[in-house]
Image (spheres, helix red, strand yellow):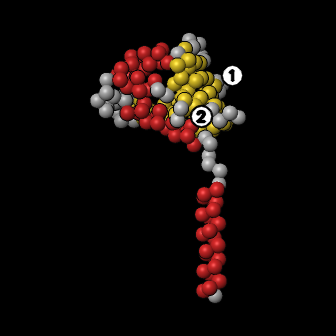
């Protein structure tokens, strides 16, 4: 009986190890990790001692040079990394009261392996300064992302209108 149990456990261990080694890696994992890094950077705000300009330059590395941001609802489109960086530098003092989380991130890899389409829900959590209470606003977005060397960058952001 012991010998049979040892053989069964050995077979299970070998099968699990083979699955771990040979199972296809999640191709969207790098894209999700990059978006997590973006959220972490935004959520740090200015508490790490960097000035608004330095933080904005760091945030700029998450976007392509020719990024397009379409927020809908009558908002003017935003074109280019330089515009995004400039806006981030001006808005940082006001955004320190907010935290962002990306939820329900769905990644569809392009056939070329260098592009990806991402559907996600962005949660904007406002921390109450005096009351300590939080309020939540959530919006859906579609992102087009491109691989730039080892990193992924956002090439297009489109807000999805949920009420029509």
Residue 5 sits in which quadrant? bottom right
Q: Give 156 or 113, whichever is nearer the viewer.
A: 113
Residue 11 sits in which quadrant? bottom right
Question: What residue is rendered at 49% in x and 38% in y?
Answer: 36
Q: Give 47 or 146, whichever is nearer the viewer.
A: 146
Question: What residue is rendered at 57% in x and 43% in y?
Answer: 29
Question: What residue is rendered at 64% in x and 56% in y?
Answer: 22
Looking at this view, name the residue that lies furthest to the bottom: 1
Locate the N terminus by quadrant. bottom right
Q: What element carries label 2?
A: strand
Image coordinates for residue 35, horizontal then vertical, percent: 52, 35
Does residue 55 appear in this view?
Answer: yes
Looking at this view, name the residue that lies furthest to the front: 149
Does residue 95 appear in this view?
Answer: no
Q: What element carries label 1?
A: loop
Mark 2 vs mark 1, foreground winner is 2
Q: For label 2, count other residues whose C-alpha is less than 10 Å away and answer few (under 14), some (14-19) or many (20+).
A: some
Image coordinates for residue 88, horizontal then vertical, percent: 42, 20
Image coordinates for residue 142, horizontal then vertical, percent: 62, 28
Q: How far apart are the two marked residues, 2 and 1, measured between alpha carbons?
A: 19 Å
Q: Give 5 or 76, whichever is nearer the viewer.
A: 5
The answer to whether residue 72 is left or right of residue 136 is right
Looking at this view, name the residue that lies furthest to the right: 111
Q: For label 1, count other residues whose C-alpha is less than 10 Å away and answer few (under 14), some (14-19) or many (20+).
A: few
Residue at image mark 1: 164
Residue at image mark 2: 120
């Amino acid at each position: 009986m012991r010998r049979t149990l040892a053989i069964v456990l050995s077979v299970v261990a070998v099968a699990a190890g083979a699955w771990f080694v040979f199972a296809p890696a999640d191709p969207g994992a790098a894209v999700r990790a990059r978006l997590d890094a973006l959220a972490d950077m935004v959520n740090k705000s200015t508490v790490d001692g960097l000035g608004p300009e330095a933080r904005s330059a760091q945030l700029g590395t998450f976007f392509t040079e020719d990024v397009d941001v379409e927020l809908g609802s009558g908002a003017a489109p935003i074109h280019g990394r330089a515009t995004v960086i400039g806006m981030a530098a001006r808005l940082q003092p006001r955004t320190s009261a907010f935290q962002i989380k990306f939820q329900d991130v769905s990644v569809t890899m392009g056939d070329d392996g260098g592009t990806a389409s991402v559907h996600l829900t962005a949660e904007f959590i406002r921390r109450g300064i005096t009351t300590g209470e939080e309020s939540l606003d959530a919006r859906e977005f579609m992102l087009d992302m491109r691989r730039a060397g080892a990193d992924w960058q956002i090439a297009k952001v489109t807000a999805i209108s949920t009420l029509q």
